[in-house]
Amino acid sequence: MTSSRTSERWGAPLWGALSVLCAVVFLDALDVSMVGVALPSIQADLGMSTSALQWVVSGYVLGYGGLLLLGGRTADLLGRRRVFLIALAVFAVASLLGGLMNDGALLIAARFIKGMSAAFTAPAALSIITTTFAEGPARNRALSIFTACGASGFSLGLVLSGLLTELGWRWTFLMPVPVAIVALVAGLRLLPRSDERGEGGHDILGAVTITAAMLLLVFTVVQAPDVPLWRTALSAIAVAALFGLFVWLERRVRHPLVRLGILRSAPLVRANIGLVILFGSYVGFQFVAMQYFQNLLGWSALETALAFLPAGLLVAVSSTKMGDLADRYGTGRLIALGSVALLAGYAMFLRLDAHPSLATMILPGMALLGIAFGLSFPSLNIQATNGVSDDEQGLASGLLNTSGQVGGAVVLAIVTAVLTSGSAADPIGAFRSAIIVSALFALLGLAVAVSGLRFRSRSRSGTATAAAEQVLETV
């Protein structure tokens, strides 16, 4: 255990460092969700076509999802504190530029750069936590607080965006700038300096290959609804070839970007699959719900944003308690229970019609989704990083974040295709069919979560459970 590891009692410096990391993950998550409500205003002001407008969102996902693995490994090799602070500075500059742009193409470029910077801050922040707080109750508590801020930022970003859009869409880009600057100054003073460069060389060819594969994968998925099938098929073949080349390289280089042996950990693999499904199904549902509330019911942007408020509040309140619950019951049970809540939440919205009930459909449905995120999101982060050595925490964090972003892009593309293929004469049926897609993914997530329970130890200790899983599943 390194000298940076903590005792049970945290002093002011540790709380300060954790606050900086939480502020940045809140900003990262906020930026993902906040632009959604502002899109109509951006389109009207900049004269962008619908196909071009989607890239305001997709450009961020492309930069974020494509570079996360590289970002995580770079943090391990060059120093987590150093990478985190540099990327945060780039994030602040890109936010400022995005708010000042008067051209759609330049705005998309700024969003891409923001996504790239977030691809370095997110895994670096998570790996700073996992190498600062000892595995067990201390780390679980820190991760529950950290992930609560991320989940809350994603949920509450919709509400904040609704308010800021009333003032002007540019404020949704400019608002993060002063927060990022304050976090940067505080990070220079509060983040631990014991973070040393990792040992090993730089797998440049592997980094280029996997980054190209991830960028092409996200690009292919996002473009699939708008291009001929043969182009999508060719892109998919190219993606498969790049991934195959990457695996071939990683098995032969001395210092691989991704040690493939890390994937022998069944808990880590299940956590990554779980986040693909959790985040992906919710992004798809959120897209459908935004269309349903605004286009069919005629709600305003602010009214639509407020509909998501119950979920955001529940995530903010419940996630901070997940560390203690993970210690007592283990992450597997919490993820399984969260999967049940996720499926039930989507099922509530299958009853949607032209006159939905706020009391019997919208509020309980959103509450169930909030419970699902509160239970599952922190537990997946804990499960993915337990048992991983310090020098690979950035890699584990990058894998997990990549899963979430790629899952969001893939499921959103499927949901969008189902929604747009629905009959114009039956919009309710089209919305319902699209939500069924999210529900089916949630059902798959429940099956994956339940499959992990059979490996659980009888011990209620989160640390003992994680250790037992590692032994049983890597031998």
Image (cartoon, rainbow, N blue to C red):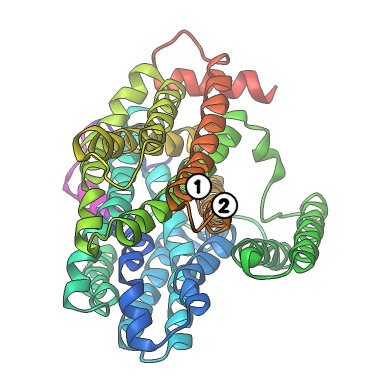
Residue 434 — which label? 1
Q: Which residue is mark 2?
A: 418
In this view, which residue lies farthest toward the top? 458
Q: Residue 395's x, y, as percent?
A: 56, 50
Give me the residue at 57% from left, 52% from top. Answer: 418
Name the amino acid, label 1.
Ala
Residue 9 in the image: above or below residue 210:
above
| 408 or 472, nearer to the observer | 408
Q: Quadrant of residue 396?
A: top right
Name the amino acid, label 2.
Val
Res. 380 visible in picture: yes
Res. 193 visible in picture: no
Name the secondary structure under disc 2. Answer: helix
Residue 409 in the image: above or below residue 340:
below
Q: Residue 448's x, y, as percent?
A: 57, 27
Give me the residue at 57% from left, 49% from top. Answer: 399
| 121 or 429, nearer to the observer | 429
Give me the residue at 75% from left, 64% from top. Answer: 229
Name the secondary structure under disc 1. Answer: helix
Q: How far apart are the alpha carbons under marks 2 and 1?
A: 6 Å
Q: Quadrant of residue 325?
A: top left
Nearest to N terminus: mark 2 or mark 1:
2
What is the chief secondary structure element of the magenta stretch?
helix
The quarter of the image holding the N terminus is top left
Q: Residue 130's x, y, as percent?
A: 42, 43
Pointer 2 with pointer 1, Cβ within 8 A = yes
Residue range of the region highlighted in magenta in the rendering: 9-22
